[in-house]
Image (cartoon, grey):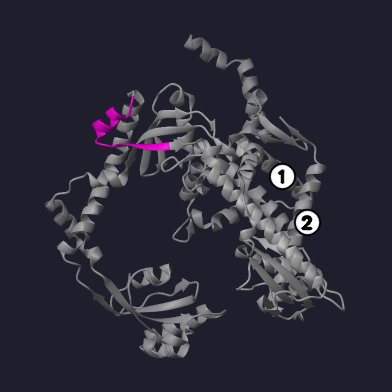
């Protein structure tokens, strides 16, 4: 048979097929062959261009990972997968119409442009140089091929160019900025009469009929939701560390290993700091003069822009690690005593660093560090065992009919919590994933233990239902005091409002009630330290008083009411040459640019032919 195949492969038909393959590959590439048999599924089409399923699924995965990273306690079960898929598809459609618009305008990167961008990206560099192996590894770790990454770069770059061009074209009317500043800095002249709860408390009575009526009208407020009394086992790295024995010899060996780290080393450095357009040339001159034997201290006084240390010949004094900029520290701690570094670039400029002196302190005695060393060693051992014990607990709890057996087997404690609702309860049932497990059908109705839930990298919990409580209506006797407090607060506010209305009427009639209790404010801005913020807001919401009068209003806030008399509004002079004014102009222009960009996106989408599959 093999000979038959070999003979047929030399025949005319085989040669024709091979010839067609060669022509296809030379003209259209491998995609022509593969695509002839199967096309990649598309999730949407934008103006005839497909958004592929592979591109969509990769973007969904990346968005899911991003949202998990934003969670304080990452929990995959909390992700709304359907919403993520909708958001991602909307984003890909938005990107597609923008890319197509850019291409129509001739905004497109060449292969050389993409090469240039990639080689300049720091994440692909080793020792400041582009490293192809790192590039390929990083891209593959992100779940992409090199070609896919280049295409993503092409799209994102042109989209960012369009966004930058439109948002930076926003403008702001100077009058709008001036008006906003005038409103912000406006001051007002006003008087305030405050009425406290004590002045109306004796007028307020809450009767049994009031309580009964409120209860009947608001019965739904007094529903006790379904609750679970739960048992649980908590496995933590800390508790595991507490149970681990560490011998005296282990502690002494560990002390010897760590002694150097406990010894405090400080280094006295001098530096010459250069900044500006000619920093490199200036630094070269300094290095030449140092090489010719001139004093580092003298050159620091002459050249360094750090005027404070320059007076001392560049001397910065002694400092340990964690004080200086990372690049400065790395260079300093690589020097031998008396040695001068090569130029070091930091955010402050270009430095020459000289190590003047090293001083080291002896490490603390073993007895002083014994407790700390024990914790570190125990935690290190616990870290090694945690995954193993966690797996044992997961297996034991899955097979057990209760938690007592797994707890006894692993030397853990069964703990209890009452009153866990579907919204959660006391810790650890403030974790939504654990609560969802507790209320699952298998656990709630089947009587099983929950799966092991990781609350964090070092804490895991398994739980079960001790007792389930159906939702119920609270009886009036249970909530009588609660209703009484609510009704009293409501009646207090009503009495305060009525009293304030009476006083407003007197003021409007030209009277001055309770003259000794008024507070007067002249030229007052929006921040008043000794007045309820709600009253201040009410004052600044009042309309301007007429030429021959005042404006009067009332406001109730909590257990206080106020009569507000607005006497005048003072407009500030807005200086247009201040930094505040310029910043506001810039901010308003950015807002305008963002609105224009959003409108541009909306226009493209409305005029595109979009088909979702």
The quarter holding residue 399 reads top left
Rate crowding at label 2 as few (under 14), some (14 to 19) or many (20 or more) other CA atoms within 10 Å.
some
Residue 588 visible at all: no
* Coordinates of residue 314 in the picture (x, y in percent): 40, 85
Q: Is residue 14 left or right of residue 292?
A: right
Measured Cα–Cα span from mark 1 to mark 2: 15 Å
Query: Is 350 left or right of 210, judged from the image as shown?
Result: left
- Residue to which mark 2 is pinned: 596
Dot 1 alpha-carbon crowd within 10 angstroms: few under 14, some 14 to 19, many 20 or more? some
Q: Quadrant of residue 547?
A: bottom right
Please tell me which of labels 1 and 2 falls first in the chain. Answer: 1
Residue of label 1: 94
User: Which residue extends farthest top?
Assistant: 1
Residue at (45, 23) in percent of width and height: 442
> Residue 66 in the image: x percent, y percent?
54, 46
Q: Is residue 567 left or right of residue 113?
A: right
Helix, strand or loop under label 2 = helix
**What residue is shown at x 69% (from left), y 41% (from top)?**
90
Image location (x, y in percent) of residue 309: 42, 85
Question: Comparing marks 1 and 2, which lies closer to the viewer?
Answer: 2
User: Measuring 35% from the left and 31% from the top, which residue is drawn there?
Assistant: 394
- Figure quadrant of residue 79: top right
Q: Which residues are magenta?
A: 402-418
Report the side of 301 relative to 208 (left or right): left
Q: Which percent across, then down, holds residue 357?
A: 28, 80
Under tag 1, what secondary structure? helix
Q: Give the camera-side residue of 414 and 370.
A: 414
């Amino acid at each position: 048979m093999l000979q038959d195949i070999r003979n047929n492969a030399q025949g005319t038909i085989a040669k024709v097929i091979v010839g067609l393959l060669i022509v296809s590959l030379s003209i259209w590439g491998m995609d022509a062959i593969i695509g002839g048999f199967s096309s990649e599924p598309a999730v949407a089409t934008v103006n005839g261009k497909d958004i592929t399923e592979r591109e969509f699924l990769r973007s969904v995965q990346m968005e899911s990972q991003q949202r998990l990273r934003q969670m304080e306690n990452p929990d995959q079960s909390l992700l709304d997968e359907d919403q993520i898929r909708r958001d991602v598809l909307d984003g890909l459609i938005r990107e597609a119409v923008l890319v197509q618009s850019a291409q129509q305008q001739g905004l497109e990167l060449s292969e050389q442009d993409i090469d240039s961008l990639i080689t300049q990206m720091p994440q692909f560099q080793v020792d400041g140089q582009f490293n192809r192996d790192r590039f390929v590894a990083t891209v593959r770790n992100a779940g992409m091929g090199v070609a896919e990454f280049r295409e993503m770069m092409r799209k994102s770059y042109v989209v960012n160019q369009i966004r930058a061009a439109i948002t930076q074209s926003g403008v702001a009317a100077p009058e709008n900025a001036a008006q906003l500043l005038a409103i912000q800095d406006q001051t007002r002249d006003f008087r305030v009469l405050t009425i406290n709860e004590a002045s109306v408390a004796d007028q307020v009575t809450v009767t049994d009929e009031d309580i009964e009526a409120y209860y009947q009208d608001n019965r739904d407020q007094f529903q006790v939701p379904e609750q679970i009394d739960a048992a649980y086992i908590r496995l933590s790295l800390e508790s595991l560390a507490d149970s681990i024995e560490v011998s005296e010899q282990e502690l002494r060996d560990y002390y010897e290993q760590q002694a150097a780290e406990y010894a405090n080393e400080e280094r006295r450095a001098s530096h010459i700091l250069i900044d500006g357009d000619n920093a490199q040339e200036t630094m070269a001159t300094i290095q030449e003069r140092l090489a010719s034997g001139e004093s580092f201290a003298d050159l620091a006084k002459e050249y360094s822009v750090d005027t404070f240390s320059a007076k001392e010949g560049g001397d910065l004094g002694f400092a340990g690690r964690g004080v200086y900029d990372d690049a400065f520290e790395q260079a300093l701690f690589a020097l031998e005593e008396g040695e001068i570094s090569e130029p070091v670039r930091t955010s402050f400029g270009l430095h020459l660093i000289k190590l003047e002196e090293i001083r080291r302190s002896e490490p603390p005695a073993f007895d002083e560090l014994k407790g700390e060393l024990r914790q570190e060693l125990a935690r290190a051992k616990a870290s090694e065992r945690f995954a193993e014990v966690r797996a044992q607990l997961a297996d034991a709890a899955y097979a057990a009919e209760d938690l007592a057996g797994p707890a006894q087997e692993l030397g853990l404690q069964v703990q209890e919590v009452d009153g866990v609702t579907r919204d959660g309860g006391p810790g650890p049932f403030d974790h939504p994933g654990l609560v969802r497990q507790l209320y699952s059908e298998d656990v709630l109705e089947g009587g099983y233990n929950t799966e092991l839930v990781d609350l964090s990298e070092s804490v895991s919990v398994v739980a079960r239902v001790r007792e389930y409580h159906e939702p119920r209506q609270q009886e009036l006797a249970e909530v009588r005091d609660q209703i009484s407090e609510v009704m009293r607060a409501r009646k207090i506010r009503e009495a305060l409002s009525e009293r304030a209305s009476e006083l407003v009427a007197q003021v409007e009639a030209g009277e001055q009630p309770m003259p000794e209790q008024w507070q007067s404010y002249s030229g007052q801005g929006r921040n008043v330290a000794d007045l309820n913020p709600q009253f201040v807001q009410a004052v600044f919401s009042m309309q301007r008083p007429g030429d021959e009068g005042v404006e009067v209003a009332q406001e109730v806030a909590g257990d206080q009411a106020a009569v507000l008399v607005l006497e005048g509004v003072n407009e500030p002079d807005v200086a247009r040459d201040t930094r505040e004014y310029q910043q506001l102009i810039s901010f308003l222009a950015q807002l305008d640019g963002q609105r224009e960009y959003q409108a541009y996106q909306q226009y493209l989408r409305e005029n595109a032919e979009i088909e979702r599959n």
